[in-house]
Amino acid sequence: MSISGRAAVTRGVLLRLREQLEFTKRGQELLKMKRDHLAAETNRLLAKVVMRKDLDRKIMEAYVSLKEAYLNLGYSGLLSQASTVDKMTVKVRPRSIMGVIVPEVMVEKVPEIKPISSPSAYKAAERLRGLMRELVDLAETESRIEIIAYELMMTNRKVNALERILIPNLLELIRYVEGRLEEESLEEFFRAKRVKQVIGREEK
Amino acid sequence: MKKPETIYLITRTHGRRTHLLNPEDFNVMAKSRSLSEAVNQLLRSDYAVEISKLPSREVDSARLEMIFLKTLVDRYFTVVKDARGKVQEFFRAYAARIEIENLKRVLRAKHTGEPIDSRNLIPLGREHTTINFPALLKAENVEETVTLLKETPYAPLSGRVEAYRRLNLPIILESLLDKIYFERVLERMDGLVDVGSLRWLVCQEVDLRNLSLIFTLKLMDAPPRLIEDTAIPIYYKLRRGVVRRLAQGRFEDGGEILAGIYSGVLDDVSKRPGDESRLEVAISKRIYDNATFALTNFFLELSYVVAYMLLCEKEAKNLVTITTALDLGVSEEVLRSRIL
């Protein structure tokens, strides 16, 4: 059903509709800007995700070292060596990109592996520690992409809705109201003329 | 002339040695397609009783490791129980290596305040140790742990706490524990028969432990002075001067410095640069090769018993390696290269 079917036809409504159209067009422009910015940000982040392949290879190498440490020390021995290493601490804080809240992960403390007293455990820990920052970066990038991609999809939908439905409907409504108002003013003009004619005839 | 109780101990050990798994058993286990297949082969060994207590779905390498370590403890203390007098004192001191390993585990955990309980330790019965491990496990930090050890042979640890705190390296305390252990073993060795072969076996182990310590610290780029200070100050073939040269030289020069002393120990490591994890295997192999040598050459001496104890340790390590490898899906080729 068309919007025009429900609209009251007054000059006040026409003014409000024109204001609404102006506002909607400005909103559409802003959403387009947001969409472009988010798309640019996604492209930038996608370039970072390329490192995943390299990281997968490094993880496999580190895993081989870890297996060797397990073979040399057994579970309890390696667990004991691992207990000498402090836990890595990271801080996750929210960051806004065009109003989209994405996580920003900051590594606060990188574990010190020097307390490890077994060469194989040390080697495995060295490889794994080198990967931790890259893993955190990748996790941050991937979660950002996920959030931004969702927001991009929603923004796109909003832009499309404004462009294809809301603005055309408003334009149609304005045209309808303008037409009706013009008709009403013509009717009024005609009525005034007729009244004038009738009064003139009576005076004669 | 040996005392009858010493001859009894050596003879009993000859009998017990037949219970050890041989290299062929390890090879067959390494060929297993699954952990359960390997475990089935252990059902014909000393481990059968403990393994059969485990429900089959609960069999994993971590649980099996505890069984292997428990059997190792039992074997050690059976030797101690069979010995008499000074010989018993010596073997009690020698078996304290398990207590030392547990102390190291406690200290490592206390270094970071990581929770630790008795399941993280080698299952050593209260009757086999004078250390109050339950109290140590409850200690807040390294300082408290060391304080609790004041009335024990490990009291000298308190003297190194400051250096440990300054450098933040538990290896400083671990090397002191090794020093205390080996000094006690060597002290108890005095006055025993067959001291020559016993000293050869124990002191070579000290040297090899020192090598492991030196190269581990070199791997961490520790300063030469720290390496020299941390090394166990018991020198046999590895003289103080050699330790200094190793501490000051590069990792790669180690093979050259050790030529004629412990040639070949670093061969496997230097063949694969960057794979220093092989160091542990190479050093352990050398220690157990010495034990095998003692087993065939000193078969009527007390060093035969020490060699047997070392081979028990080797067996436990090999079984841990095999079951862990099968659990982690390590290839047979890699596994074979890791068997001691």
Image (spheres, coloured by chain):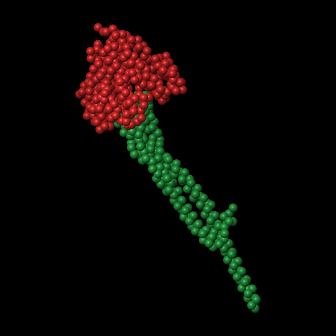
Chain colours: A green, B red
- Answer yes or no: is residue A108 visible: yes
Which quadrant holds residue A196? bottom right
Does B335 sit above or below residue A3? above
Give the answer, above or below, for where B196 lies relative to B132: above
Of B323 and A75, the residue lying toward us: A75
- Most extreme residue toward the left is B241
The residue lying toward the viewer, choosing from B142 and A113, is B142
Instruction: Name the residue rendered at 46%, 51% in the picture.
Output: A94
Is residue B105 shown left or right of residue B59?
A: left
Residue B216 visible in the snapshot: no
Please name whichever residue, B265 or A88, is drawn nearer the observer in this view of the structure: A88
In this view, the residue in front, B153 or B309, is: B153
Q: Residue at x 31, y 32 (%)?
A: B172
| Number of marks | 0
Relative to B116, say whether A92 is above or below: below
User: x%, y% of residue B290?
Assistant: 34, 19
* Residue A103 % position (x, y): 47, 49
Q: Residue at x 40, y 36 (%)?
A: B114
- Quadrant of image for the C terminus of chain A: bottom right
Q: Measuring from the top left, give residue B251's x and y in whole percent.
A: 31, 32
Residue B78 found in image quarter: top left
Residue B314 in the image, given as x and y percentages of width and height: 40, 21
Could you tell me which residue is drawn at 36 percent across and 21 percent down? Answer: B95
Side (left or right) of A75 relative to B231? right
Question: From the image, which quarter does the N terminus of chain A lie in?
Answer: bottom right
Give the residue furthest to the bottom.
A204
